[in-house]
Image (tube, rainbow, N blue to C red):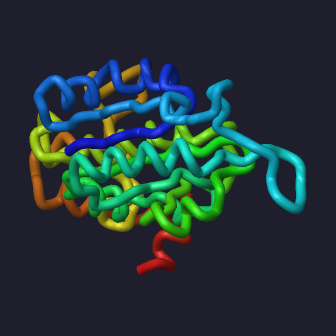
Amino acid sequence: MRIDILTIFPEMFAGPFDHSIIKRAIEKGHAEIHIHNIRDYTTNKHRSVDDYAYGHGAGMVMTIQPIADLIDKLKAERDYEEIIFLTPDGEVLKQSMANHLSTFKNMIFLCGHYKGIDERLREHYITKEISVGDYVLTGGELAAAVLADSIIRLIPGVLSDETSALSDSFQDGLLSPPVYTRPSDYNGWEVPKILLSGDEKKIAEWLHDQALERTKARRPDLLDEH
């Protein structure tokens, strides 16, 4: 998988992709992440990539020219399944969406700033708009990192135990059940005996019941979706 990220703050990605699972995925060749500085493509002599909004309101708008030129350049080099704009008014990211996107080969992520991007970019270039939640960030970089992480970890071969992702929260419409590890008794706080029984069928039933109860208590809206 190749992800091209378009941003005016490329240095923000130095941390998220240089550690842990994503770093290993890149080193093993399962994923490529290419960061592009939008300012490198502007024809403005001051390297400006924003301007005042026509007609109304405070705040600046990201201009068409550098973003369009950069996307055109990338599209001339390869085909992209999606050109994704990270925006608060996009479709909210869910596990099912991450599952679907993890099967793609090439994607572009556009990180917005200020009051957003010129609407004509959304009309003529963007194929999908994604939000990481109903709140506003200072820019799309953190959202792009979240989206990339949620997708790359699902690529076959990235996780050392590929079945681990199948038991994550939201994969089956439920939250994950509680988990425990050694010691089985700490300060008198004991691990549920069923988990120590070795009876795989009963353990699976218990885990499902716990997941269902946790979902009812914490995220009943997930049950309403099914």
Residue 217 visible in the snapshot: no
Q: Residue at x 68, y 37 (%)?
A: 138
Q: Residue at x 39, y 31 (%)?
A: 35
Residue 225 visible in the snapshot: yes
Left of 64 or right of it: where is 149? left
**Quarter of the rendering containing residue 161:** top left
The percent coordinates of residue 113 (x first, y second) are 65, 41
Q: What quarter of the picture does the N terminus occupy? A: top left
Q: Tell me if residue 200 comes above or below residue 153 in the rendering.
A: below
The percent coordinates of residue 133 (x first, y second) are 59, 54
Q: Tell me if residue 2 comes above or below residue 56 in the rendering.
A: above
Q: Residue at x 35, y 41 (%)?
A: 4
Q: What quarter of the picture does the C terminus occupy? A: bottom left
User: Between 215 and 201, which is closer to the camera in this rendering?
Assistant: 215
Left of 38 or right of it: where is 100? left
User: Between 127 and 225, which is closer to the camera in this rendering?
Assistant: 127
Q: Tell me if residue 48 comes above or below residue 99 in the rendering.
A: above
Left of 37 or right of it: where is 133? right
The percent coordinates of residue 83 (x first, y second) are 40, 57
User: Between 99 and 123, which is closer to the camera in this rendering?
Assistant: 123
User: Between 97 and 193, which is closer to the camera in this rendering?
Assistant: 97
The percent coordinates of residue 50 (x first, y second) are 70, 40
Left of 111 or right of it: where is 170? left
